[in-house]
Image (spheres, helix red, strand yellow):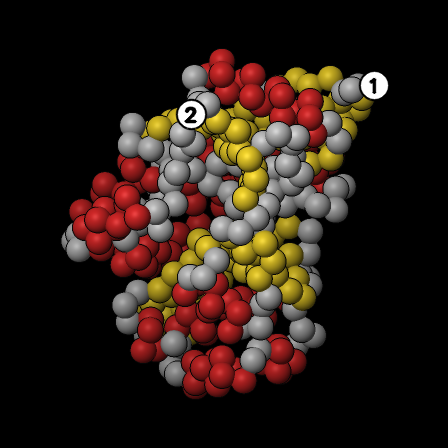
Amino acid sequence: MPTVREADLADSRDSDAIDAFVRAQPQATPFHLPAWSRSVARGCGQRAHYLVAERGGAIAGVLPLTAMRSPLFGKALVSTGFGVDGGILGEGVEALAATAWTLAQRLGCPGVELRGGPAPDGWQTDDTSYLGFARDLAADDEAELLAVPRKQRAEVRRALGNDLNVEAGGAALLADHYRVYGESVRNLGTPVFPARLFRAVLDEMDADILTVRSGARAVASVLSLYFAGTVFPYWGGGTTAARCLRANDRMYFALMSHARARGCTRFDFGRSKTGTGAAAFKKNWGFSGVPRLYARRSEGAAREVNPLNPKYALMVKTWQRLPLPVANRLGPWISRGLG
């Protein structure tokens, strides 16, 4: 059995060795990278606990963890915080899981949540709540259009005919992105993440922002991650005006072209709850939903932060009615503990 230790991500040698190991694993995601754990800690103040399994001094497996603490939603040790993946990678599944559980008890966290990766023996599993959507990119824009089912293809063609401008870049686009994203999630009834989380991800990782404008006004924007030839449109949304302008359709089609120019061959549309409008939207683009396996272990009732949970229905409706400046002021304080 391998030995397990907690890595020091502030030590460049430790961090670099983990980074190299992660990038060599076929099942790795950007959420396994030490840079993601550092970004979450820097952006949300939630401490990273990165576990490493070793054999003969060589890394054999990893488990990035974030200690989530929230006065509203409780505590949990999550792999990984604010990620949709990042579970156990490589060897030492049982040893890493056992160490994670011991660490959770020491930190006073009643549960451990693993997003993706193999499920440890005896842990509660869920492969029905979430679907993942990913497919290869086509060779060029025209082939990409043909890869989109007919009904959605017509929407994309309409979007291409509208007077919209597309801009891609880094931190200089962050303010506009945050305004668009804040309005988008407020309209969905969920609190916006702290702006410093987005800035930390842009600083630490291979990431950029693509923004669609109507005149000078930003109406849709997405912050994407790039990893192993795949683009991950991760934090994106549109304003109320985006719907009639079909700006979201323009945005995702433009991102496919932008990612192809950056050398990407695959587009990962992320996860969505089974049976939701978001899942249907991605299927309309020609993506097939694949069940995502999550695992958890807890003492007593497990933490549940799913916005579709009926007990949050009133909270969601109330949030949708908040004035945008109020929602954007309160949102980061609440969302930093959701993870």
Q: Quadrant of residue 149?
A: bottom right
Which residue is pictured at 68% across the width and 56% down the height? Answer: 229
Q: Compared with residue 255, is residue 292 higher up or lower down, i.e. above or below?
A: above
* Marker disc for residue 302: none
Of 30 and 116, the residue lying toward us: 116
The percent coordinates of residue 203 (x first, y second) are: 50, 42
The percent coordinates of residue 199 (x first, y second) are: 43, 43
Q: Which residue is mark 1?
A: 56
Q: Amino acid at mark 1?
A: Gly
Q: Compared with residue 178, is residue 98 higher up or lower down, i.e. above or below?
A: above
Closer to the N terminus: mark 1 or mark 2?
Answer: 1
The percent coordinates of residue 31 (x first, y second) are: 58, 41
Which residue is pictured at 41% across the width and 56% down the height? Answer: 173
Badge 2 density bin: few <14, some 14–19, many ≥20, Cα 10 Å: few
Of 222 and 202, the residue lying toward us: 222
Badge 1 density bin: few <14, some 14–19, many ≥20, Cα 10 Å: few
Q: Quadrant of residue 217?
A: bottom left
The residues tagged by marks 1 and 2 sit, at their Cα atoms, a distance apart of 38 Å
The percent coordinates of residue 185 (x first, y second) are: 32, 54
Instruction: Specify whether 282 is left or right of 187.
Output: right
Label 1: state its secondary structure: loop
- Residue at the extreme right: 56
Q: Amino acid at mark 2?
A: Gly
Q: Which residue is mark 2?
A: 300
Which quarter of the image is occupied by the N terminus?
top right
Nearer mark to the viewer, of 1 and 2: 2
